[in-house]
Amino acid sequence: MPDFDTAEDCGKPSCPDPLRASLYKDWKHAWSPTKLMGADWVAQKWKEGCNKVGPLSSKLPPESFCYSSTSYIMLGMVLAAKANAASWQDYDQGAPLPAYLKEKLTFATKGAPKKYTHVHGYDRTTYNVKAGEHADHDNWEVAGVFSGWTASNTVATPEAVADLTWEIYGPEHKLLPEKTVNLMLPPTNGLYGLATMKLNGNTGQNGGKYGRAYGHMGATYGYQSMSAYFPALQAVITVGTNIERNEQEQPAAAMCLAHGALAGMTCTSFKPCKCSFPPDSDDKKHKPHKPLPPATVLELAGLAGAVAAKPLENQKKIRGAWCGTNAATAVQYLSRAGIAIALAVKECAARVPPAEDATAMEKFMYNAMNACAADITEIFGSLIWVGAYLSMVATECASHSKLQDLCAGMIQALVGALSQTAAAGDVARATCKVPPEVPEYVAPFPVRRLEEARVQPAEPPPAEALHQAPLRKAEEQPAPGGPGVSPAVVAWDAKVDMSKEDLDLETAMCVQDSMQAAVMLGQFGVALDQSIFSCPLDDLSPWTRNLCVEDISMMLLFVFQASSQVAGAVSHCGKAIGLRMGSMCYASIMRVVSAAGGLPAVAAGLDLSCPGTKHNLYKTFHGLTPAITHISSLGRRLANATWDVASRAASALAQGVPARDQQAQGETGE
């Protein structure tokens, strides 16, 4: 059965398209389906030699199938008759759909696109165009755009079409039985099944489960779109554009790059894109359009495109978990900074200056490695961590992922980790010696007074003797409080006069560490969930590899930080000095280890989010970047975000893409 659409590649410039010419000439009137089926080139005709798109089935020869939009009109007639509709206009095309989809899809039976959408559609094909010229026909008021009825009259947002595609092909099979869907799928060696087109070429993959895709393209006068289901990902990508070109390369390119973003596949500058959409067919006798660069294609996708991935619904909850835990951690680090300030006020005031005859290097090391310096670096590091987690909150809790905030957060995390590593190293130097080192002055970490089982010497040795006598020589009589604790240490602990303020600070640190340990264990659980999602795709591309590295590294960061906080809580809540100093030693070591464990996450995050890095997402994916970070473990997946259509339209204008009505809401004719 011949196709009523007369747009065919004739192998030369200015290919004739009689139906297009007629519809443009009489732009106020459309052709009804009965008129189209009665056209001279359709009625009582049978097209021979169909060999353009391959076999319908592996059991049939290639010449047995050609694409024909007329078949969709015939199917509409059958459905209308089965529904006992009085005429084709009375048939409700949305009747079989779920209720929520009926509200989202419009089926135009009369009128021009102007009646249904703000989006203008532009014909930039070479049909009926003289050599040396090019078309840019605005079809917003052309009623013939919807000629074809059930073949070409759907008006909807890409999101709605993605939902429709999901209902047809998705694993739940709510719209059609699985047996029927399997009959529709294209054969392995063919391009077309039953109303279903093989779209493997738009994945950028050479075979394999991630290279399988099927759905349909949608082209009408001035508008072109595409919707595909990817069974390996259990996801749908739908692209709608307001431009019509001979080869439909812009929706194909956008889908390929969106698929690469969704699956982390290499269809970008990292590796030559192998999407098989055809190149521009204009030849030297025509004045060619300027090729659409990837950035422009992606702006088109931003103007009227969507990524839908129903199975990632759980990731919205994960993103909410990151929002909550990051906000809680920011508050906790702010509280930690406040306690550290109070400690610094006391400890820096009691600081003993270095000996006058010390060298410059000895004075520097003395000033840099003491409790006062540890407090100051702790304050600085905590405040930097507050900024880092607030930057994360800014993107995790927002409707749109913000790559610049992610970059800022990663840089702040790096600085904060380095600062707190310095503080932890100073504490470890003092507490991890056996026997412990007597501090240079009163009130270093830990400072809680020994309340029970302590030895009070009759005549405590003077401070000068404590400073001068190496502790390793005072170990003959182990004292209560734990192994490795010498009488000198017990004597020092006994002479510390703990005021109520000191005890309150210790209690505050105990509570602080306990609460922070609980939150970090929660963050560890979230990072574990994300690694399960991202690491199976580790070997696909540098982006998925970075995401896997980031998630595993964050697991290490949080589990080591949690163990450090638990040990800190034991130290600040405990009484026996041996237990307290041993716990503080362990806590400080775990803080250093956690910083080392988190460095790969920082490096991977910087590589993905910061300008100028090799694998910066925006540099590669441009307008699709917010969607990518929403559905990736970096941005915590698919929130209910919407595109800023006006800004996308403005950006598209800058690229030479017509978008005259900036009030467009993303609808596409299909």
Image (cartoon, helix red, strand yellow):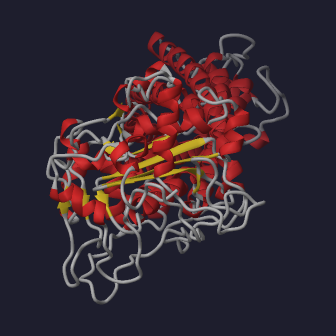
* Residue sitting farthest toward the right: 476
* Residue furthest to the front: 44
Q: Residue at x 49, y 60 (%)?
A: 45
At x 72%, y 63%, the residue is 189
Q: Say left or right for 358 vs 155.
A: right
**Could one spot residue 117 in this view of the protein?**
yes
* Residue 19 screen position, x and y as percent: 30, 60
Q: Residue at x 67, y 57 (%)?
A: 56
Residue 602, compared with residue 483, is above or below; it is: below
Seen in the image, is 209 located left or right of residue 355? right
User: Can you give x and y, in whole percent of width and height, for residue 549 in the image?
Assistant: 63, 52
Q: Residue at x 76, y 60 (%)?
A: 58
| Residue 540, quarter of picture | bottom right
Name the side, left or right, on which 494 lies relative to 651: right
Q: Quadrant of residue 546?
A: bottom right
Q: Nearer the viewer, residue 524 or 235?
A: 235
Image location of residue 567, percent across then percent down: 67, 28
Q: Nearer the viewer, residue 632 or 524?
A: 632
Q: Is residue 445 visible?
A: no
Q: Is residue 525 above or below residue 537?
A: above
Task: Determine whether, in the image, residue 648 is placed left or right of residue 279.
Answer: left
Is 75 or 567 nearer to us in this picture?
A: 75
Report how many numbered discs are placed on residues in the image. Answer: 0
